[in-house]
Amino acid sequence: MGVFCYLMEAPYLTWAMIGPDGVVTRPPTAVTDIDRPVMIHDMALTRRFLVLVLGPLYFDVRAAIRGGSLLSWRPEDGTRIALIPRNGGPVRWAHTETFWTWHGANAFDDGDDEDAPVVLDYVHWSHPAGLMPGLATGGLARATIEPRAGTVQRTWLDQGSMELPRVDDRRIGGRHERIAVASVTGRRDLVGGDHDALTIYDTRTGSRVRWDAGNLAVGEPVFVPRPGTVEADDGWWVTFATDRTDGESWFLVLAAGDPGSGPVARVRIPTRVPLGLHGSWLPTEE
Ligand SMILES: [Fe+2]
């Protein structure tokens, strides 16, 4: 797997690779061309590249010491995407109009040749909520990045308020068929970061299925494959959820073939599970 680390001091950003046996195969390596500390929340990994989106959100320690905000949003700078070759070659930079993202769903190489585009599916925001006046808007977007030209083309898979996108973990770095997100129905008054639905997209057809979770505030959906299968919908989407009416938390299981019908099983969790957690499903045996 690939990892990244942002730092308050030069070199500000490093990356590394770790093999499936836990051995570091690429020690922390600096990304040059960065001249100040920048906040990055997530990354994606293709067969060729680590993919990092650098929105213009900088750490400003001096401002924080003076009582201001530690984070500074500078939309005039635009957003950059770094394609970092896993083999250690020079970083390919792409520049695009300003946007912000917390979470990517997945990325993959769209072809086998050296200059093939990189496709990144992610949750797009106009700006980080709370750091600029005005409502942050966005949706589920697909960025097609040309490594040699440094260009980015964006298309919308959907627009609206959503977060915590996930694919079947077996598809990470390759082509995925589904993206699941925590989303909002628009039927309820929700505080920031609350979601009252799960939506599962078919990225090949553009169709989507939504489950209205009612009083449950749902979290990140994680795909659990049925053991021994490889098909896209042969398994379950699971998530934690907390009931807004009584604060009880639940582990929910939705059939991936029919998520719109809601959970086929739910397990009460004996403690409250905070919203916004990330998680992974680890089978006890294959
Ligand atoms: Fe996160």
Image (cartoon, rainbow, N blue to C red):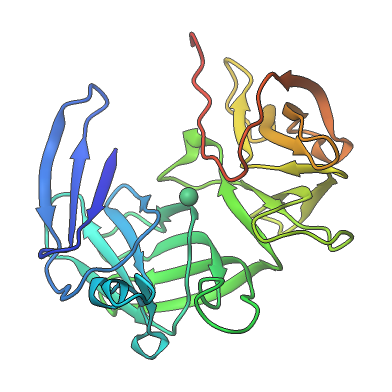
Towards the viewer: 231 or 97: 97
Which of the 4 image quadrants contains residue 268? top right
Left or right: where 27 falls relative to 103? left
Residue drawn at 80 percent across, 21 percent down: 265
- Residue occupying image coordinates x 69% and y 28%: 236
User: Which residue corresponds to the image point at 10% horizontal and 42% vertical from the top-left?
Assistant: 27
Q: Residue at x 28, y 66 (%)?
A: 82
- Residue 80 lies, with reference to residue 237, above or below; the image says below
User: Residue 167: image x %, image y %?
Assistant: 56, 43
Q: How many marks?
A: 0
Q: Is residue 131 left or right of residue 248?
A: left
Residue closest to the eye, 244 or 98: 244
Residue 133: image x %, image y %? 58, 84
Front one among 183 and 87: 183
Left/right placement of residue 173 relative to residue 89 reads: right
Quadrant of the frame with the N terminus: top left
